[in-house]
Image: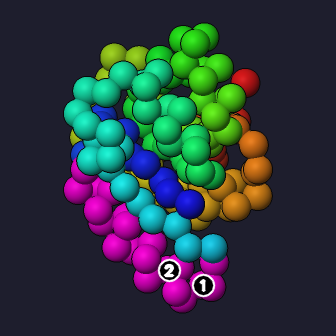
Amino acid sequence: MTVYFDENIPPHLAKGFHLIQEKENLKNGRVPFSVKVLKDEFGQGTKDIDWIPQVGLDRNFVVTRDININKKKDERNAYREAGIGMFFIYGTSKNAGLSVWEILFILAKHWEAMIKIMLEDDKAFAYKLTAKGRPKKLP
């Protein structure tokens, strides 16, 4: 299993989470999974509708700030049909940008819950991640 960080997430966060998760996989005896940067696999600027089916070839997951993937019908249908689990990082408002530290805080806060969701949910899903509260399942 692979967790892909979309190109709107700083790539060094993916590398950091990969290093941490690699050690945690060994320590906890979990199903091993890695953390990768989406653009490293599919190229910078690849359209969502093009990478989604490729990511879905295996049981993979995506962390993104691109909430339009869940709003655009064709992209939403594509990730659902591909069986991809999606985690959408939300700021405090639609127009609020997030610093790397805010993104790191949100991911660190929810990482264990995300792992549980990834291991237990065997079909496509979408969750909203914010600085407050728990991951919220999206329709």
Q: Is residue 121 above or below residue 119?
A: above
Indicate left or right for 119 with 60 as reference. Answer: right
Q: Disc 2 marks which amino acid?
A: Glu
Tell whether position 19 is magenta.
yes
Tell me the residue at 67%/39% (across/down). Answer: 83
Residue situated in front as seen by the camera: 2 or 21 = 2
Indicate left or right for 88 with 116 as reference. Answer: left
Q: Residues within 10 Å of mark 1 (few under 14, many from 20)?
A: few
**Spatial distance from mark 2 to mark 1, Cα to Cα?**
6 Å
SS label for mark 2: helix
Residue situated in front as seen by the camera: 106 or 120 = 120
Tell me which colouring the rendered structure shows: rainbow
For the residues bearing labels 2 and 1, Cβ distance under 8 angstroms: yes
Indicate left or right for 43 with 138 as reference. Answer: left
Q: Is residue 61 above or below residue 28?
A: above
- Which residue appears farthest toward the top when viewing the image? 73
Q: Which residue is mark 2?
A: 24
Residue situated in front as seen by the camera: 60 or 68 = 60
Q: Disc 1 marks which amino acid?
A: Asn
Q: Which residue is mark 1?
A: 28
Q: Which image quadrant for residue 97?
A: top left
Per the rendered image, the range of residues in magenta is 11-30
Q: Is residue 132 visible?
A: no
Where is residue 131? Give x, y as percent.
47, 43
